[in-house]
Image: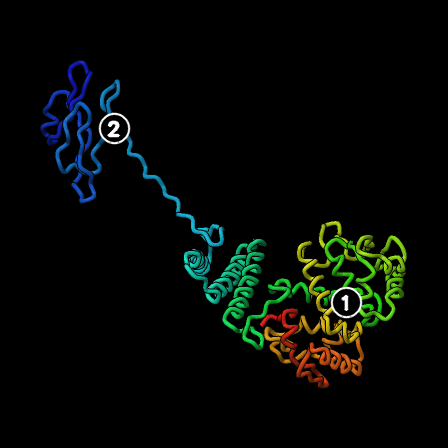
Amino acid sequence: MVTDREGRWWQVMECCSRCAAATPGAKTAATSQPPTAADPPATAPAGGTAPAAGAGTGAPQFSDDDHGLVPVPRAAPARRRPPQVKVAQRVIPHDLRPVVLRDELIELGNLFRAYQQRDQPDLELLADLQERKARAFTSWADVTSEGPLRWEARRAEQAAATARLQDQQRTGGITGGDGTAVTRLLTVPAQWEHARSVLAYVADHTPLPGPDARLLVLMLTLRTAHTGTGNLVGQDLTALGLTDPQDLVEKLTGCGWLSLPGTAGDLLASRPENATPITVPSLAPREDGTGPFTFGKKMRPKLSGWAQKVISDKKLRKAKATAATRLLALTLAAQTDASGRLGPGGQGIALTALAAWVPADPGELQQLVDQLTEADWLTDAALTDTHLTGQLTERVLPLTCPLRA
């Protein structure tokens, strides 16, 4: 670089070291480097001359200021953040390990987005995707210990079961004798599991012995399951086929299981326009807001309606079926496979399990089975020393709650 006598401006030129040493007022700014293929083309600074072609990346850059031309620092390249990848509206961390889990989640996100672009649904494919999602989210929850991920995995399992059942119904996998799909009163596996949870709870918490008490406690539980309170009229009790409903109500209030504003007689005399409020203290939510059941207030009337539909079946009423027979009908409806065959996989129900749900002596069980057969509820029934096998008739298939395959 060469300056004028007053030092007001600088002139940059390219020359060899000997010429620079022989030029008055010249100073060496930098030594040029061998050019490379990645070098950008050289540009001329304001007020100066362009460096010769071939100046390397190490050549200085200059800018004007009040003191002349000074080097300009080269800006560091901006660091790019890795793009976000999502599955089910959740961001997959870029550092999630193991890598195979992260790859599976990324692939699932792409597959679900591709499925949403389909013109026609494929329920079998959707069920497979939901099952993969359930497994992947369970593994994700195991790695990160995040509770919502485990909850999302359970939702995916339910969605997979629902999609597979809908596919079976659509393709004729679950049909009646005329080949039409079965439309159930309770439509999804979650509802079926809740129905079984109520039956199991009542089997363990009925305060009085006998099938009459069990059936009454079951129906009262379904009326009050969410808050511990509900409304009842006399017809609700007389329709159950109980031997002495007033005596049972008095015993339930006497032991503290049930609370009424009046007497048992008042309850039996009540009509829809003046329903009786009832309270079951053991079903009231605890201080933390939880109770014995996990379903919400919208699910409770669905379950209660299902049970009422079973026990008030026209042919059961016509046959004047006992409380034990109606309780057995409820139990069998919740213990079939998708086609209506009794027990897991249609292999029958173990008598030890059946005795826990229906409090009847082994000798009485055959009579109850015969009553259900005569009422066109059960067919091909066979009672052995260990199991009850058979098939629910087509007319009651809509009331069944299939077991998981």
Could one spot residue 277 in this view of the protein? no
Q: Nearer the viewer, residue 30 or 302?
A: 302
> x, y (%) of residue 71?
25, 28
> x, y (%) of residue 325?
77, 75
The residue beneath circle 2 is: 71
Figure quadrant of residue 366: bottom right
> x, y (%) of residue 193?
65, 65
* Residue 170 as seen in the image, left or right of residue 252: left
Nearest-to-viewer mark from 1 and 2: 1
Q: Which amino acid lies under the numbered mark 1 shown in the image of this protein?
A: Asp
Q: Tell whether label 2 touches label 1 (CB within 8 Å).
A: no
Q: Nearer the viewer, residue 326 or 224?
A: 326
Residue at x 88%, y 57% (from the top left corner): 266
Q: Which mark is residue 405?
A: none
- State the CA–CA distance, disc 1 to disc 2: 86 Å
Residue count near mark 2 (Cα–Cα under 10 Å), binned few <14, some 14–19, many ≥20: few
Say whether disc 1 or disc 2 marks the residue closer to the N-terminus: 2
Label 1, secondary structure: give it.
helix
Instruction: Identify the residue at the far top of this view.
Output: 6
Q: Which amino acid lies under the numbered mark 2 shown in the image of this protein?
A: Pro
Residue at x 52%, y 70% (from the top left corner): 168
Residue count near mark 1 (Cα–Cα under 10 Å), binned few <14, some 14–19, many ≥20: few
The residue beneath circle 1 is: 204
